[in-house]
Image (cartoon, grey):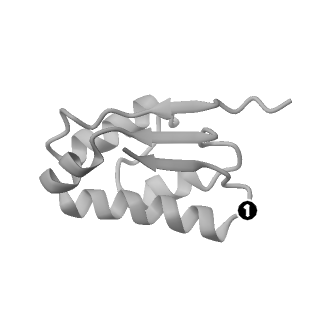
Amino acid sequence: MSSRVQHIEIDLTSITSEEQLHTLLMRRLEFPHYYGKNWNAFWDVITEPDRLPHVLTFPRWSEFQHRLPEAARELRDCLERASAMYSYVDCRIEYA
């Protein structure tokens, strides 16, 4: 029986900086206390086996993408690359 969380929804509505985004991701995805709050650290953590839930939803994605296009691109790119490169990163991402 897997101990992975089934579904996590991360509301990006109030995020106005990359620093806030990393803090929110760290909290909601229960990253370790030593998480470096940058894209390299994000990659290292999400590619750990069973780190991500089965389903990860980002409501109001288009609003976030409009507000912080570079951060949105980095986030999406990391998640998609991890899923493509590592079969154990089995997480469906929903950009709602």
Instruction: Say which of 11 and 43 sits in front.
Output: 11
Q: Is mark 1 on a helix, strand or loop?
A: loop
Relative to 13, residue 91 above or below: below
- Nearer to me, 22 or 57: 57
Which one is in front, 75 or 34? 75
| Snapshot quadrant of residue 24 | top left
Residue at horizontal 50 percent and vertical 49 percent from the top:
93
Q: Residue at x 27, y 37 (%)?
A: 12
The outermost residue toward the front is: 96
On the rendered structure, is 57 left or right of 72?
Answer: right
Classify mark 1: residues with Cα within 10 Å, few (<14), some (14-19) or many (20+).
few
Q: Quadrant of the N terminus?
A: top right
Q: Residue 43: horizontal and vertical position, in percent?
A: 50, 59
Residue 72 at what x, y percent from top left? 28, 57
Residue shown at 69% from the left, 43% from the top: 50
Q: Please indicate whether residue 1 sits to the left or right of residue 79 in the image.
A: right
Q: In this view, does 71 lie above or below 26?
A: below
Spot occupied by residue 79 in the image (x, y as percentages of width and height) = 49, 58
Q: Indicate the amino acid at tag 1.
A: Ser
Residue 26 location, x and y as percent?
42, 36
Q: Residue at horizontal 23%, vertical 39%?
A: 20
The quarter of the image holding the C terminus is top left
Q: Which quarter of the picture shows residue 15?
A: top left
Q: How many marks?
A: 1
Residue on which the image places disc 1: 87
